[in-house]
Amino acid sequence: MAPKVKILSNYFGIDQAWTYDFYTGHGGYETAKKVLVEKQPDEVTAEVKASGLRGRGGAGFPAGMKWSFLAKPEGVPRYLTVNADESEPGTFKDRAILEWDPHMLIEGILIASYALGVHQAFVYIRGEFHLPEVHLSQAVEEAYAKGVIGEKCLGTDYKLDIVVHRGAGAYICGEETALLESLEGKRGYPRLKPPFPAVSGLFGCPTIINNVETIANVPWILANGGAAYAALGTEKSPGTRLFSISGHVNKPGVYEEELGIPLMTLINENGGGVRGGKKLKAVIPGGSSTPVLTPTECETITMDYEALAAAGTMFGSAGIIVMDEDTSMVEVIVNLLHFYAHESCGQCSPCREGTGWLHRTMKQLLKGQGTADDVEKILDIANQMEGRTVCPLAAAATMPTRSYLTKFRSEFEALLPKLAGV
Amino acid sequence: MPFTSEQQTRFEKAVAKYPHKQAALLTCLWIAQEIDGYITTAAMEYIAQLLEIPPSHVISVLTFYSMYQTEPIGKYHIQVCHTLSCALAGAEKIISHLENRLGIEAGETTEDQLFTLTRVECLASCGTGPMCQVNRSFHENLTPEKIDALLDTLKKEGAAHGPQS
C-alpha cells in the first residue's frame, strides 16, 4: 500500500506551527517564490486545472475552471476573496487550517492572486472565530514584515495586500454573494446570479471566491504538479479532503483522507466507531444541509462527489455527523429546522416564512400536538419553497427535511394522531 | 465626539484598508463594541459620518448580524452552541446546568451584570461539543463540573476587576 499522503494536515496539533519560523523551517514559501519567478500566471491556472481540484466549500466546482472564468477588463481591479465563514453545522475543518497552518493559506492566496492578476485579497472570517483570527492575523503581519506580501512579494515586482475581514454572526454570509455584500458593508443578502462574481463581484469588479481549504491546496499542487494531485483520490474526485467527524463517535475530529474512502472506514477507523458500542442509525455525510443516509446506504457508500450524488445526497462540506440508534430523527430535524429558520436572511418570502413554518409544524409534531395531515403539509411547504428563492438556503432546509421524512417516515407517523375512523 | 483621538485613529486605520469607505462598516462596528461593550447611538452616528453613509444604513446593517449588541450586556457573555452536533453531545444538559447555577434563563443577564447567557447556533466546534464561547474564548468538551469550575474562575476574576466600565 502506498504511504498515506497528507497535504493539509501535516502540522495540525503541533505547537507554534502557525508561526512564520515554523512554516519556513519546513519549506514554506519556497513554492510561491519559484512560481513568482519562474512561472507565467496562466501556467499556474493550468496547473490547478490539471489537478482537478474542486471547491471545498460545498458546491464542488472545479477551482481551475472558476479561475479561468475571471473577467480581465483593462484598468479595473480584480479581487480574490477567501471564504473563511465556516458555519455549516458539522463542519470545523477550515478552523483547523486557520489555527494551525495559516501561512499555508497565505502562500495559497499569494500563488492564486498571482495567477489571477489580483493585488488585493480579502479573507472573510466568521466573527465568532477568535483563535483562528488571531493566528491568521499574526501570520499576515509576519508575512508583511518578512516581505512575503506587500509592495514587493518575495523580492519580486509583484504587489499583494491581504486584508483579514471579520464577519459578525450570520450563516448566510458563507453564501458567496452574501459574503460580498457583507464585505461591502451591507446586510448579507445574497445576490441574483448572473452576473457571476467572476464578472461582477466585490465592488462591481471581477472577483474569485474560494474556500479556505481549496486555497490551502494550491501550494502543494504547484510544488508537486497538478498530475500528482490528480493521481490521488478518484478520477472525477481527485485529491484529499479534510473530513470533520462529529456526533456519536468515539474519536470526533478532523481527518485528512483521499476522496473515495468508504464512509464506514471514516466512521470506524478514523472516528473510532459508534460510541458505547451502539448501533448506527443515520449519518449526515456533508454538513447539515445534505440529505441523511441510512445504515444500509452507509455500508457501501464511498466519499466522493459521484457516489454521494448517486445516493441522492451531496458531498457538501464533508462534515459527517453520526447518529446512534437512540437518536430521535424528529428531534434532529426540529433542531436543524430551528437553525435554518434562525439563519434565513429574510430577503425571500418563501424561505423567510417557509423555514419558520417548517420548524413550527415539526415542533408541534414532536410535542405530539400535530394533526393527521402534518407530514403531507410539511412536504407541500417544502415543495413551495424550492426553486423560488435567490440562494440555496431554502433548499438547504428542505432537502434534509424531505430525506428524514422519507427515510424515517414511521418515526414521524408514530407521533401523529390516528385518523378518525381508522 | 464619543471617541478619543487615539480611538479615532483606530477607526481611520481600519477605513484605510479598504478600497471603499463603506466596506469598513463591520470593522468599525467591532471597534466601537470593543471600546464601549456595545454600540451606542453616538458611535453609530460617528461611524455614519466617518464612512459617509446614512445613520439608518448603519442601524440596518448592525441589526442584521447576531454578534453586535445595542445595549449593555453582562461582563461575561456565555454563548452555548445548541445546534445538532452539540445537541447530540448533550448541549441541553449544559444549558440547564448554567440556567440553574446562574438563576437565569437563556437570553437573560444576571442581576449583578456579571453574566449573560445566550443560546447560539453552530460555532464550528462540532468535534468538541458540548461547548460554549465566553466573550471570545471557546470552552470545549464541557461537563457540569467544568462549568462549575469555569463559573468560579469568572466570578473571582469579575470581582477582582470590578464591574464592566
Image: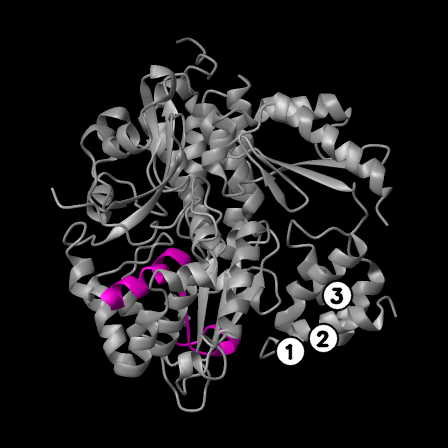
Identify the residue position indicated by label 3 in the image: B56
Label 3 secondary element? helix
Q: Is residue B149 magenta?
A: no
Mark 1 or 3: in front is 1
Identify the residue position indicated by label 2 in the image: B12
Which residue corresponds to the image point at 50% horizontal and 40% vertical from the top-left?
A: B125
Disc number for residue B16? 1
Callout 2, which amino acid? Glu
Label 2 secondary element? helix
Q: Earlier in the sequence, mark 1 or mark 3?
A: 1
Left or right for A389, reference A44: right
Label 1 secondary element? helix
Seen as rendered, the residue at the extreme bottom is A74
Residue B115: percent from left, percent from top? 77, 36
The answer to whether the residues at label 2 and label 1 have Cβ atoms under 8 Å apart is yes
Query: Gap in Å between the C-alphas at discs 2 and 1?
Result: 6 Å
Q: Is the same chain shared between marks 2 and 1?
A: yes
